[in-house]
Amino acid sequence: MYGQRALGKNVMDIRQHNCRAKNDIEVGDNMMIMNIAPSAFFTNCAELIAGDRITKINGTPVKTKAEAVAALKGCVGNDVKLELLRRQFTSPVTAERAKKIGLTRLDGFTYFMLTCTKDSTDPVSSFGFTLKLLKNRAHVIALDPKGIASIYFCIGDALLDLDGTPIPFNDIEFVRGYTQKFNKLVFRFLLRYTQFYIS
């Protein structure tokens, strides 16, 4: 059944450099990283994504926001090792990618790269999502549960670029061209993803 690959989460070990605790990240009550300071996107927190859920700090399990904040404060000025749960198939946006497309980050959104690959068992049918273009963004407004897209996307995701090429202003054919080539390619999206949809 298609879509099952999206149900799991990656468990990752991440090293945050020169931790500045409260100044770098904001942790929510559910242990989710709710915000990353703009100054830390490509420096101290380059390996983190807003929406990551912290499970351990320096090998010690943390179950409450207070525990996480206290542990991070104890690491100020030092490297800290975080174990995280992360949405599958995602990775942080690199500084090079952000610069290439002229990315301007907005408050209340999280940005990440999403890598899509076609397995030999996937159907050779349509990609399986409906997009609505608004300026230079393609918003996912519907998903076919039997389509490949349901493995990777959530309703509410917004595509900003495809393989490092910004989406042209209101050019739906540009996006269709990429999804039609998906039968043969591995390609990477840059997404803007509202925190409301992160689970």
Image (cartoon, rainbow, N blue to C red):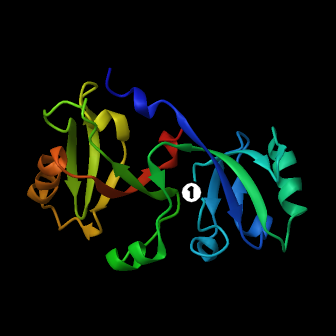
Please state the horizontal and vertical placement of residue 74, each as a whole percent of the image: 91, 62
- The residue most toward the top is 1
- Residue appearing at x 56%, y 57% in the figure: 49
Q: Please state if 23 lies on the left or on the right of 105 as rendered.
A: right
- Closer to the camera in the image, 33 or 151: 151
- Residue appearing at x 14%, y 36% in the figure: 126
Q: How many marks?
A: 1
80 in relation to 104, above or below: above
Q: Is residue 125 visible?
A: yes
Please state the horizontal and vertical placement of residue 160, each as a whole percent of the image: 31, 61
127 in relation to 38, above or below: above
- Residue appearing at x 28%, y 25% in the figure: 145
What amino acid is found at the position of numbered circle 1 in the picture? Ile
Q: Please state if 181 lies on the left or on the right of 63 as rendered.
A: left
- Residue appearing at x 21%, y 52% in the figure: 185
Q: Is residue 153 visible?
A: no
Q: Secondary structure under badge 1?
A: loop
Q: Which residue is mark 1?
A: 49
Name the image quarter holding residue 62. Answer: top right
